[in-house]
Amino acid sequence: MILVTGGAGYIGSHLVMALLEKGQNVIVFDSLELGHIETIETLQKYGNLKFIKGNLRNLDEIRGVFMSNKDIEAVVHFAAYSQVAESVKNPQKYYYNNVYGTLNLLNAMLEFGVKKIVFSSTAATYGEPEYTPIDEKHPQNPINPYGNSKLMVEKIMDDYDRAYGLKSVRLRYFNVAGADSKARIGEWHEPETHLIPNVLKATPDKSFKMFGDDYNTPDGTCIRDYINVEDLAQAHVLALEYLKNGGETNFFNLGTKNGNSVKEVFSVCEDVKGCEIPLEICPRREGDPAILVADNTKAKKTLDWEPKNDLRYSVETAYHYEFKNKG
Ligand code: UFG
């Protein structure tokens, strides 16, 4: 049995789908504050999925999960807040949830003898890039509370390995994109802040706002590394196998090693939609680095992971999901 925290959310639900399709039994623990019960109901059609509503900030709720499910072998921990701007305004929310909540999870794991965890970390732990593409040796100097909260958890995990033998794999995501290839699940955030869904949703009344076209990049817009959500889910499956096979605590960048500018993404979206998308050039958004691209060599070598889907595929699947579910 695999326990997935935050399994009703965007990335977590794609891992749950991948595990269920492999015949794996899964428990999802999710507060449904940001995740959706509809996503759980969809997932339950594809395999043996037990859902437990609860919050990691409540130690007894997560202890209860381990107490009544003695067959949990490993945990994949997605549950977190992840909006950079919000974290700057309200750091308390981020440290309480992302750090304290994770401590409760880790302590419950230790109490019940579960010593394997795959953790959703982020490119935001690196802060302002000193070079590109970013490998795992790049210094980690986050520039916002969200990145800090994720880095704190990474450090706690190192200490918990040294002291208690808890093995972790930390996956540092770059820009996650796309949806399930059959449009069963996808990206569903309220409010939506991410680039691709915002471009696809734009209408003549609500044009897409491009945050800055005066960056020091070839077309003046920010460059990001868009990693397909199903490829990302596959990396988690491989990380679980790595831990099951006795792998040591480790950390990997998950991206494609290719960057695309906001303008390039915009034009792929127009192409996929087959129409012009209303566009408004706006000032820069605070805290956006010009270029963020992953060196994924380590994940390829150690986990034998290979991202298969390109940006266009991510946009197509995101569009199909959006169209199927919201018309
Ligand atoms: N963008 C727009 N308009 C929008 C939304 C985004 O122009 O409506 C631009 C942003 O300014 C940025 C690019 O599109 O240049 C990508 O923005 P996203 O919000 O989609 O993604 P980010 O790169 O800001 O964020 C991602 C993850 C975060 C993580 C961060 C690390 O979603 O969780 O990378 O820096 F913290």
Image (cartoon, helix red, strand yellow):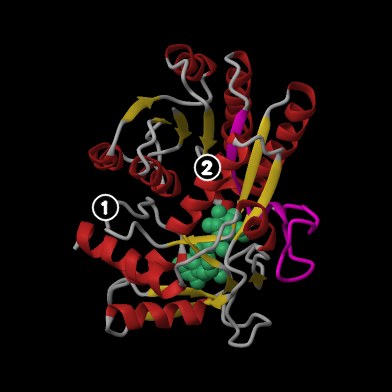
Q: Where is residue 317? Give x, y as percent.
A: 33, 65
Q: Overall secondary structure of the magenta stretch? A: loop
Name the quarter showing ligand 1.
bottom right
Task: Out of 112 and 203, give the one closest to the viewer.
Answer: 112
Can residue 184 be seen here? The reply is yes
The answer to whether mark 1 and mark 2 are in CB contact below 8 A is no
- Say whether residue 139 is magenta: yes
Numbered tag placed on residue 184 in the rendering: 1
- Say whether residue 313 is magenta: no
Q: What crowding class fits label 1: few (fewer than 14 Cα within 10 Å), some (14-19), or many (20 or more)?
A: some
The part of the chain drawn in magenta is 116-143
Q: State which quadrant residue 224 falls in.
A: bottom right
Q: Amino acid at mark 1?
A: Arg
Going 44% across and 44% down the picture, which residue do you hit? 12
* Residue tagged 2: 81
Q: Where is residue 289? Give x, y as percent.
A: 66, 68
Q: State which quadrant residue 225 falls in.
A: bottom right
Going 31% across and 85% down the picture, which residue do you hit? 276
Going 35% across and 52% down the picture, which residue do you hit? 188
Tell me how far mark 1 sits from mark 2, CA to CA.
24 Å
Left or right of 203, for residue 312: right
Q: Earlier in the sequence, mark 1 or mark 2?
A: 2
